[in-house]
């Protein structure tokens, strides 16, 4: 009996693996047509400067509106999009759409330079024409380069095959004024002193360190040291995933420049995002 049960388990497992594979293939097929069917959209999450309480920038976050499944979050489809190489055309669309949004923002807020940050996958960065894609998107939107920020994940950048040429591309973009941010900082292994060698302007500290703030008691939280060191290197610091007033107050004490998180707003559609730019005392 035990043997039979075992065999059944095995069959079940085999079936579910097959089921997963079918699901994955189906999803990849719908992702292939999603771009031309205009099923992608960007949500925007405000990044608020602590000194002023006003919006300093927005992070553009990709959403997939599938007619059968509804709104799908990036964790559910980005890995497949990367694996299949679809990240290249989709990522290009994200850059263009984010620049178009930044243009509309610039028209609305003439005296208030607000930037828009986009997440860039290392597969996109590794493409020969990446720098050209960014420059063309800026030109098409008639957008000053400093209104665009490129977010790149620390671990992914460090582990990339063509690290030297990836760094050279970021350097070229930084030289024309594009802001470069290191995303999810602290989740990897690279030391803070290594940051000096990277062409970056901004460090985005991962939510994990923000979560630790409340439990650090009287000790200087790790995030306090990270902020101080980043400032010594001349970098701007954004804390991600700020959910409570208490975290916000502590970040103010540790002289963090800006915060992003549910405390201020979840990522929202464009119309809602535009309503936030005239508000003060957001943090
Ligand atoms: P990320 O770049 O680190 O973006 C921050 C994520 O944290 C977003 O999730 C955001 O909604 C979420 N978040 C913000 N504030 C809070 C908070 O206070 N609490 C909690 N629990 N979460 C918060 P989202 O939109 O689901 O995106 C997940 C990840 O998908 C992003 O992480 C980014 O790595 C990736 N992603 C999103 N859009 C794109 C894109 O256009 N291209 C690429 N390559 N990756 C993207
Ligand atoms: Mg990001
Ligand atoms: Mg992040
Ligand atoms: Mg993340």
Image (cartoon, grey):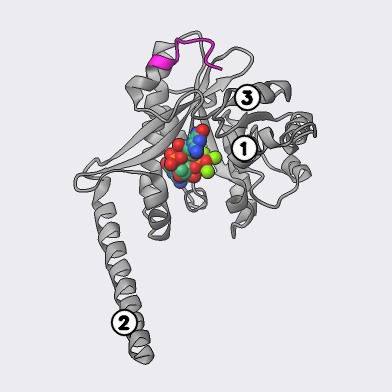
**Residue 278 colored in magenta in the image:** yes
As drawn, the label of residue 11 is: 2
**Residue 246 colored in magenta in the image:** no
Q: CA distance from mark 2 to mark 3?
A: 52 Å
> Left of 56 or right of it: where is 92?
left
Q: Is residue 276 visible?
A: yes
Name the residue rendered at 51%, 12% in the picture. Answer: 112
Compare marks 2 and 1 and give the one earlier in the sequence: 2
Q: Return the residue at label 3.
A: 246
Residues tagged 3 and 1 counted as in contact (Cβ below 8 A): no
In the rendered structure, which segment of residues is drawn in magenta? 275-283
Q: Quadrant of the N terminus?
A: bottom left
> Left of 191 or right of it: where is 84?
left
Mark 1 surroundings within 10 Å by alpha-carbon count, few (fewer than 14), some (14 through 19), many (20 or more): some
As drawn, the label of residue 16 is: none
- Residue 212: image location, x then y, percent: 66, 38
In this view, the residue in front, 208 or 162, is 208
Name which quarter of the figure residue 201 lies in. top right
Q: Return the residue at label 1.
A: 211
- Residue 282: image location, x then y, percent: 52, 15
Q: CA distance from mark 2 to mark 1?
A: 43 Å
Compare marks 3 and 1 and give the one earlier in the sequence: 1
Name which quarter of the figure residue 168 lies in. top right
Residues tagged 2 and 3 counted as in contact (Cβ below 8 A): no
- Residue 4 position (above or below residue 144): below
Under tag 1, what secondary structure?
Answer: helix
């Amino acid at each position: 009996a035990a043997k039979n049960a075992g065999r059944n388990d095995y069959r079940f497992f085999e079936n579910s693996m097959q089921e997963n594979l079918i699901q994955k293939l189906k999803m990849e097929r719908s992702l292939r047509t999603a771009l031309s069917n205009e099923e992608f959209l960007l949500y925007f999450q405000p990044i608020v400067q602590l000194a002023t309480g006003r919006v300093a920038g927005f992070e553009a976050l990709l959403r997939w509106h599938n007619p059968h499944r509804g709104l799908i979050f990036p964790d559910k489809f980005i890995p497949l999009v990367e694996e299949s190489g679809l990240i290249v055309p989709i990522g290009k669309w994200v850059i263009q759409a984010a620049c178009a949004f930044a243009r509309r923002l610039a028209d609305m807020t003439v005296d208030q330079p607000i930037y828009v940050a986009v997440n860039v996958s290392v597969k996109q960065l590794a493409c020969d024409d990446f720098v050209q894609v960014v420059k063309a998107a800026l030109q098409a939107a008639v957008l000053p380069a400093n209104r665009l920020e490129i977010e790149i994940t620390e671990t992914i950048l460090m582990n990339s095959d063509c690290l030297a040429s990836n760094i050279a591309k970021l350097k070229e973009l930084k030289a024309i004024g594009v802001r470069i941010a290191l995303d999810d900082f602290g989740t990897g292994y690279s030391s803070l002193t290594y940051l000096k060698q990277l062409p970056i302007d901004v460090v985005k500290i991962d939510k994990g360190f923000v979560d630790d703030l409340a439990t650090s008691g009287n000790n200087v939280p790790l995030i306090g040291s990270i902020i101080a060191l980043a400032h010594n290197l001349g970098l701007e610091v954004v804390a991600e995933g700020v959910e409570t007033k208490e975290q916000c107050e502590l970040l103010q004490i540790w002289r963090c420049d800006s915060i992003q998180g549910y405390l201020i707003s979840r990522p929202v559609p464009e119309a809602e995002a535009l309503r936030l730019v005239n508000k003060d005392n957001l943090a």
